[in-house]
């Protein structure tokens, strides 16, 4: 399946996602039939190695699909981004284990990379305990990732800088308990609920490491997991910003504000606000895709991903997310009282994008990290 084909499929789904937005939000996770449709379209296997039946798509293609889906519904796009990027872990597993997990093209693998749990070495595997937040997409998952600290002989394994060295345990869905905690202001339909694991055993073959060298030396898998997470968040935010501008434009020609003889579109202040917003959106988007394409060019030449490229990806994704939120804010305020009604997509877009900005992968800490590198200061790049 080509990149143009997956993008065409995403574009075709936008109207349906928009129509079912209220249902997605009320359900608080993707309805099963929608998740199955996204799986059948190939979106969950965008980052799965081609050797196992995945698409192994270049990152820019994957992000364009996610951005497009977000024009229809932010929650659906978020679940696709989590499912797609989680597929990269299969590249670092033994082949037998990877094929066991990705047994069919519609397989959904998702979870949490943050090391919220503890995996104690036991025989040829690990005994896992813990509770994780932000388990997006887990309601429909076949397998769930759970980031853990590793305890061996009573000691926590660490990087040279003393930070715990996380690894990801991959568990069947039926060994994980989902908790009903996802009662939130935005991205309600992502089902990003807490989940817990109590004493499950995970064999070494189903354990993936953040920062480990992938067994499959392919350009896609040279991208760090933190970078891919940030890229997905930004793709969702950019799609939401595009949708917000489109909603405002549609409203502006029909709405005549109170105490005015002109439509919203005919007001000079509206014209300048829309122009500024569109310039900000496109500028942030251009930097975002430029950083991704330059990194892809570097990895495609057989080199690892340099610190400079990793820096630019994290800076571009963080900037794009917050610039997109600014665009949504402009459109929300420009629409006036119309934007506060449940019937207006702008109110959901506003809430969704501001939940996206709260993710740690696009926090102000990323600006501090990338700023240190731009200034030439000694910097710990372990989480870049």
Image (cartoon, grey):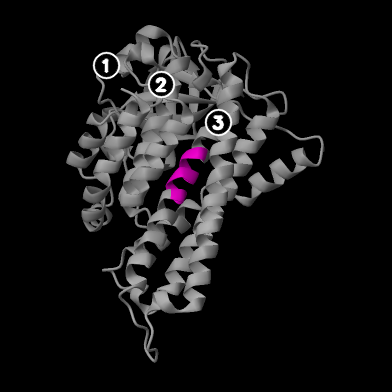
Above or below, comparing residue 184 to residue 317 in the picture: below
Q: Which dot marks residue 379? A: none
Name the residue tied to disc 2.
56
Horizontal and vertical percent for residue 355? 45, 55
Is residue 289 shown left or right of residue 186? right
Find the magenta span and give its range: 231-238
| Residue 136 in view of the camera | no
Q: Quadrant of residue 142?
A: top left
* Sequence-wise first label, 1 or 2: 2
Mark 3 lies on residue: 293
Q: Is residue 237 magenta?
A: yes
Q: Which residue is mark 1?
A: 103
Q: State whether the magenta stretch is mostly helix, strand or loop.
A: helix
Q: Earlier in the sequence, mark 1 or mark 3?
A: 1
**Mark 1, mark 2: which one is toward the viewer?**
2
- The N terminus lies in which quarter of the figure? top left
Label 2 and label 3: CA atoms lie apart by 15 Å
Nearer mark to the viewer, of 1 and 3: 3
Query: How would you rate the neighbour count of disc 1 (Cα within 10 Å): few for under 14, some for 14-19, many for 20 or more?
Result: few
**Disc with the residue nearer the chain's start (2 vs 3):** 2
Instruction: Note whether 116 is above or below 190 in the view shown.
Output: above
On the image, the x and y values in percent for residue 216 come to 48, 11
Residue 360 versus residue 295 in the image, above or below: below
Using a 10 Å C-alpha cutoff, classify the residue at mark 3 as few (fewer than 14 neighbours), some (14 to 19) or many (20 or more). some
Q: Is residue 264 above or below residue 347?
A: below
* Label 1, label 3: how far apart the Cα atoms are: 31 Å
Secondary structure at badge 2 equals loop
Label 2 or label 3, whichever lies nearer to me, is: 3
Real-space Cα separation, disc 1 to disc 2, in angstroms: 16 Å
């Amino acid at each position: 399946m080509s990149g143009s084909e997956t993008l065409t499929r995403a574009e075709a789904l936008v109207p349906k996602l928009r129509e079912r937005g209220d249902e997605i939000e009320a359900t608080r996770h993707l309805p099963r039939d929608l998740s199955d449709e996204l799986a059948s379209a190939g979106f969950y296997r965008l980052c799965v190695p081609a050797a196992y039946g995945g698409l192994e798509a270049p990152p820019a293609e994957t992000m364009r699909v996610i951005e497009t889906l977000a024009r229809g519904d932010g929650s659906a796009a978020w679940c696709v981004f989590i499912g797609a990027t989680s597929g990269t872990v299969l590249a670092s597993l033994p082949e037998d284990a990877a094929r066991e997990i990705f047994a069919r093209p519609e397989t959904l693998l998702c979870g949490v990379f943050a090391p919220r749990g503890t995996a104690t070495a036991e025989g040829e595997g690990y005994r896992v305990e813990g509770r994780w937040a932000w388990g997006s997409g887990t309601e429909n998952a076949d397998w769930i990732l759970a980031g853990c600290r590793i305890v061996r002989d009573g000691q926590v394994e660490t990087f040279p800088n003393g930070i715990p060295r996380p690894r990801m345990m991959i568990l069947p869905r039926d060994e994980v308990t989902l908790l009903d905690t996802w009662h939130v202001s935005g991205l309600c339909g992502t089902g990003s609920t807490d989940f817990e694991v109590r004493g499950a055993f995970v064999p070494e073959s189903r354990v993936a490491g953040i920062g480990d060298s992938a067994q499959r030396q392919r350009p896609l898998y040279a991208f760090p997991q933190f970078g891919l997470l940030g890229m997905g968040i930004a793709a969702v935010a950019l799609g939401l910003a595009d949708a917000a501008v489109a909603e405002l434009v549609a409203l502006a020609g029909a709405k005549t504000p109170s105490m005015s003889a002109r439509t919203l579109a005919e007001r000079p202040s509206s014209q300048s606000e829309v122009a500024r917003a569109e310039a900000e959106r496109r500028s942030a988007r251009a930097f975002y895709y430029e950083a991704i394409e330059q990194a892809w060019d570097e990895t495609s030449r057989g080199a690892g991903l340099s610190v400079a490229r990793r820096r630019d990806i994290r800076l571009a994704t963080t900037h794009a997310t917050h610039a997109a939120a600014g665009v949504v804010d402009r459109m929300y305020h420009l629409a006036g009282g119309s934007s506060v009604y449940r019937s207006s997509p702008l109110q959901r877009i506003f809430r969704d994008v501001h939940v996206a900005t709260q993710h740690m992968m696009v926090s102000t800490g990323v600006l501090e990290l990338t700023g240190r590198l731009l200034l030439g200061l000694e910097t710990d790049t372990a989480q870049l």
